[in-house]
């Protein structure tokens, strides 16, 4: 019988939030791991991010970010209705300059 590794246990009990470009600068880190015992709404995930990174800069940055849940864009959906499960990855991508 095999035993799960720490990484596998973390994957089962956490949601990873990755920050890109200006969101990374505002957060001061490339990603956060949010421990959870179950599903959260995207609104709950954002609230936890803002608790970890308080301040106007982070709030403004998240407000303009595109949001991916895995590889699926979800920004235009109601954040209270988007279900984020343990093991999921949420990507916060602010607008990029240039073309």
Image (cartoon, grey):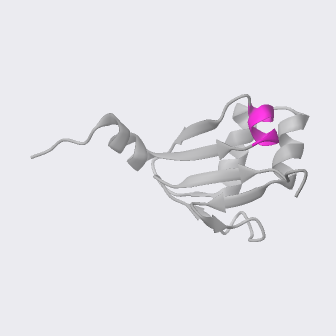
Q: Residue at x 82, y 40 (%)?
A: 22
Given residues 26 and 15, the one toward you in this image is 26
- Picture quadrant where residue 77 is located: bottom right
- At 86% from the left and 32% from the top, the residue drawn is 55
**Residue found at the very far left of the displayed protein:** 1
Residue 52, located in which quarter of the rendered image? Answer: top right
Residue 76 drawn at (x, y percent): 78, 70
Residue reaching furthest top? 28
Residue farthest to the front, as pictured: 99
In magenta, the rendered stretch is 21-27
Residue at point 88%, 58% (across, down): 99
Residue 16: x and y in percent read 55, 45
Q: Is residue 52 left or right of residue 3?
A: right
**Residue 35: percent from left, percent from top:** 50, 40
Magenta residues: mostly which secondary structure? helix
Is residue 24 located in the magenta-colored stretch of the structure? yes
Front one among 55 and 89: 89
77 relative to 87, above or below: below
Q: Residue at x 72, y 35 (%)?
A: 51
Q: Count the marks: how many?
A: 0
Q: Position of residue 83 (x, y in %)?
A: 58, 64
The answer to whether residue 54 is left or right of residue 18 is right
Q: Is residue 70 above or below residue 76?
A: above
């Amino acid at each position: 019988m095999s035993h799960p590794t720490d990484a596998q246990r973390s994957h089962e009990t956490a949601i990873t939030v990755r920050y890109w470009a200006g969101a990374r600068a505002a957060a001061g880190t490339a990603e956060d791991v949010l421990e959870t015992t179950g599903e959260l709404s995207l609104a709950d995930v954002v609230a936890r991010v803002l608790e970890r990174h308080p301040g106007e800069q982070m709030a403004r940055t998240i407000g303009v970010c595109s949001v991916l849940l895995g590889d699926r864009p979800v920004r235009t959906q109601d954040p209270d209705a988007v279900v984020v499960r343990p093991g999921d990855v949420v990507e916060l991508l602010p607008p990029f300059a240039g073309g």
